[in-house]
Image (tube, rainbow, N blue to C red):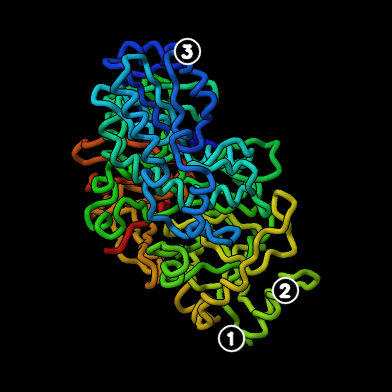
């Protein structure tokens, strides 16, 4: 394995205003107040008690939870979006105002107009009550940190105390309801906020002002950048990332690395040498056209449609045998407007690596579903190789997996998964008699799966359309460009470049997402010096905003005289 030079904390570095610690933050906010109202608006997942305690000595505190509808009303209002499924809900159309009791809001508004005492309004939706001269602060929260707090049952949902719920139910409420409502609300709030607070590390708050926040957003949107990768264990997890990404060797495994999921990853601003963390979705919301490009924004709105992540089974086990829904199914059943098509690119592979992909010729589909149902009940081992193609896999193979295709990665593989963004819509069909990390069986979805399996994706189809569909499309002095996918049903195109000399690229008004597949380092440069040269390392995923236009990539540093390989993904328009 390679020497680890993977950067786990990529950041946008610049100078600005940053304040650390509650004492300094409170002192600054007191100096900044021009009226008697301070609104501390928050994302769900913050430690509410920490914030309330920090501000309680400054004036009269109003907790926005006390202004919401009753929990029973909110649960009833959101019930149709939560559904009775253990994993899947339906995307809500609710708005922030729907969660609040309007009479209570009106009463507080009247209170604010009849007193000159210092009033601090804290919690989700606080800025709904902002007076004309109120100081407005937002406490943002990274979704991956929220999920860690879910696992520890530490934080409550929007208007609901669901800390005792299963983690999957907490996540479902976040994904289908709370985060939708909060992002829609926050998107209309950005220009009104005076200060931003980062409490992702409990007890170590940091605050930046409006000018610093927008400076960081603007800088990031104009240059190549990386989001903060998040590593997670898995029942099938492996050992490769521990070495290459320099992770905690004491952990049993790492199965996942989410290194380009902007709805869930973070951004780091390094302001005067101090890290300030914020959700990368803020960049997507604020700079969707510059980031995505006009044609992509017209199609996807303020959704980042391309996802890169790692699946490490080196020294681990098989992923679950699974299938993803078709677009029609995901629209009708979950309210999503596009599905989780994907592909497996083998970043590395052991000698016995395999991919399970598509169905064998002439199988009895009724018998297969019957066997899956028996296996789901227990006491019966599903014979995957009787029904599913088991294909030897080697480094740099690329397997295309449009929705409806039965698939999974086998052990001894290091997969770069390139997919569209919807990220929990996996219908597990068979999990190899394995328990989850919580010691319980993971949810199996044979009944949903059978409704979306494309039975025409058989051996012949797989070899003709889904395995190593490589085509040289261009070459020059010291470089070759190949098309490697994706399938014609998928909206993502992928191109692999092998090079020893600079390669010229152009965003063509669409966001580009890359991974450095070979080579210790590469450098991205602007021919017009529109951005500072940007260095990436082996296995790092990076994003080129659409507004960048023309740029070059060449071997650099340790790899200056080596051959490098990148894979680029973009939306076909």
Q: Is residue 73 above or below residue 228?
A: below
In this view, the residue in front, 260 or 210, is 210
Asked whether the beta carbons under mark 1 and mark 3 sit within 8 Å of each other, the answer is: no
Residue furthest to the left in view is: 528
Real-space CA distance between mark 2 and mark 1, rounded to the nearest whole angstrom: 18 Å
For the residue labelled by badge 2, is the local secondary structure a helix, a strand or a loop? loop
Q: Residue at x 59, y 67 (%)?
A: 322
Real-space CA distance between mark 1 and mark 3, rounded to the nearest whole angstrom: 72 Å
Residue 261, position as x, y percentages in the image: 44, 48
Asked whether the beta carbons under mark 2 and mark 3 sit within 8 Å of each other, the answer is: no
Residue 59, position as x, y percentages in the image: 42, 15
Mark 3: few/some/many CA within 10 Å (<14, 14-19, 20+): few
Which quadrant holds residue 162? top right
In this view, the residue in front, 498 or 264, is 264
The count of marks equals 3
- Asked whether residue 563 is in view, the answer is no
Q: Is residue 573 above or below residue 141?
A: below
Horizontally, residue 162 falls left or right of residue 421, namely: right
Task: Name the N-terminal-most of marks 1 and 3.
Answer: 3
Residue 348, position as x, y percentages in the image: 56, 54
The residue that mark 1 highlights is: 361
Task: Name the N-terminal-most of marks 2 and 1.
Answer: 1
Instruction: Kindly identify which numbered label has been placed on residue 382.
Output: 2
The residue that mark 3 highlights is: 57
The quadrant of the image that shows the N terminus is: top right
The mark closer to the camera, 2 or 1, is 2
The mark closer to the camera, 2 or 3, is 3
Which quadrant holds residue 183? top left
């Amino acid at each position: 394995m390679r020497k680890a030079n993977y950067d786990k904390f990529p950041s946008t570095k610049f100078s600005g205003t940053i304040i650390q610690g509650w004492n300094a933050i409170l002192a600054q906010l007191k100096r900044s107040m021009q009226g008697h109202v301070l609104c501390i608006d928050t994302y769900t997942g913050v430690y509410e008690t920490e914030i309330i305690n920090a501000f309680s000595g400054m004036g009269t505190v109003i907790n926005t939870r006390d202004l919401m509808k009753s929990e029973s009303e909110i649960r009833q209002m959101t019930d149709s979006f939560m559904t009775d499924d253990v994993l899947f809900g339906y995307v809500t159309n609710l708005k922030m105002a729907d969660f609040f009791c309007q009479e209570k809001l009106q009463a507080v508004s009247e209170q604010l107009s009849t007193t000159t005492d210092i009033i601090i309004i804290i919690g989700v939706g606080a800025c709904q009550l902002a007076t004309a001269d109120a100081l407005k602060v937002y406490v943002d929260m990274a979704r991956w940190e929220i999920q860690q707090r879910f696992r520890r049952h530490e934080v409550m949902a929007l208007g609901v105390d669901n800390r005792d719920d299963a983690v999957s139910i907490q996540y479902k409420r976040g994904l289908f309801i709370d985060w939708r409502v909060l992002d829609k609300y926050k998107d209309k709030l950005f220009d009104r906020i005076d200060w931003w607070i980062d409490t992702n590390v409990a007890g170590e708050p940091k605050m930046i002002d409006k000018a610093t926040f927008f400076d960081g957003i603007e800088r990031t949107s104009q240059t190549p950048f990386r989001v903060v990768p998040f590593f997670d264990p898995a029942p099938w997890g492996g050992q490769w990332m521990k070495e290459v990404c320099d992770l905690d060797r004491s952990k049993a495994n790492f199965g996942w690395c989410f290194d380009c999921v902007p709805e869930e990853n973070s951004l780091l601003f390094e302001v005067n040498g101090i890290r300030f963390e914020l959700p990368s979705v803020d960049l997507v919301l604020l700079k969707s056209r510059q980031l995505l490009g006009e044609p992509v924004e017209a199609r996807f709105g303020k959704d980042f449609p391309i996802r890169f992540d790692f699946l490490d089974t080196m020294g681990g086990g098989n992923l679950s045998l699974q299938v993803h829904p078709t677009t029609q199914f995901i629209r009708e059943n979950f309210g999503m407007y596009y599905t989780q098509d994907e592909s497996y690119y083998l970043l590395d592979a052991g000698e016995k690596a395999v991919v399970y992909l598509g169905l064998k010729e002439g199988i009895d589909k009724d018998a297969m579903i019957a066997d899956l149902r028996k296996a789901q009940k227990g006491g019966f081992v599903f014979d995957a190789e009787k029904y599913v193609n088991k294909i030897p896999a080697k480094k740099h193979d690329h397997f295309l997996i449009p929705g409806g295709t039965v698939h999974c990665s086998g052990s001894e593989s290091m997969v770069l998964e390139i997919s569209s963004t919807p990220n929990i819509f996996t219908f597990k069909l068979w999990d190899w008699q394995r328990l989850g990390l919580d010691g319980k069986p993971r949810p199996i979805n044979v009944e949903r799966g059978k409704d979306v399996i494309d039975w025409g994706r058989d051996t012949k189809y797989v070899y003709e359309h889904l395995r190593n569909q490589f085509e040289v499309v261009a070459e020059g002095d010291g470089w070759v460009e190949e098309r490697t996918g994706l399938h014609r049903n998928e909206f993502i195109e992928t191109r692999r470049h092998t090079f020893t000399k600079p390669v010229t690229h152009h965003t063509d008004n669409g966001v580009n997402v890359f991974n450095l597949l070979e080579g210790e380092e590469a450098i991205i440069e602007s021919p017009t010096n529109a951005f500072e040269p940007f260095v990436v390392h082996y296995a790092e995923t990076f994003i080129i905003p659409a507004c960048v236009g023309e740029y070059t990539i060449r071997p650099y540093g340790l790899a200056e005289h080596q051959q490098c390989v990148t894979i680029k993904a973009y939306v076909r328009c």
